[in-house]
Image (spheres, rainbow, N blue to C red):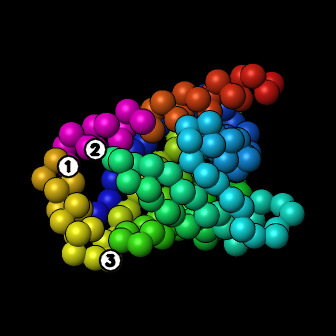
Amino acid sequence: MQFTAKEDIEGPIDRVFAMLTDFESYERAAMRRGAEVVRTDSLRNPGVGMTWQTRFKLRGRDRNLALTLGEMDPPHGLRMDFMSQNLDGDLKIDLLAMSRNRTRMTLAIELRPKTLSARLMVQSLKLARANITKRFALRVAEFAKDLEDRMRGAA
């Protein structure tokens, strides 16, 4: 099952990509929300092969998620692969320069269930697809606005 959303961001593609690959800020944000995040690779610079182990509470249960930076194509996008006990998937972010100061971001998440309970969960998501797609698009819009705000603050 896949969810996709597009947002335009005020900023040049190089700066947008730089903000997207500021992985330390995402680690700090997740920890502020109560997640445990541990970087498990030994790379010095951001690049393919970066890995994280995360632990967080979702719907009253502890969840573990392994993340891997599977693809990085500066400044055009990246792909993160994630694995949990019941579900695998990937997050793909593509960037397209619309003009010198405007970038279109396309964000897609694909979920692949590994167990029967995960298949049932994905099936229930399919039944509520319209509502979930709308909520996903709103979250992507918030994320794009946050990127714009961070770019203005870093300028």
Can you give x and y, in whole percent of width and height, for residue 13 in the image?
Answer: 67, 43
Q: Amino acid at mark 2?
A: Thr
For the N terminus, which image quadrant? bottom left
Mark 3: give few (<14), some (14-19) or many (20+) Cα within 10 Å.
some
Q: Which residue is mark 1?
A: 129
Q: Which residue is mark 3?
A: 114
In depth, the one of 96 and 1 nearer the eye is 1
- Would residue 49 be seen by someone viewing this image from the given angle? yes
Q: Amino acid at mark 3?
A: Lys
Q: Residue at x 75, y 65 (%)?
A: 47
Q: Is residue 86 left or right of residue 34?
A: left
Q: In the rendered view, would you say 107 is above or below 112?
A: above
Q: Residue lying at the far left in this picture: please name it.
A: 127
Mark 1: give few (<14), some (14-19) or many (20+) Cα within 10 Å.
some
Q: In the rendered view, would you say 54 is above or below 32?
A: below
Can you give x and y, in whole percent of width and height, for residue 33 in the image?
Answer: 55, 38
Q: Amino acid at mark 1?
A: Arg
The chief SS type of the magenta part is helix
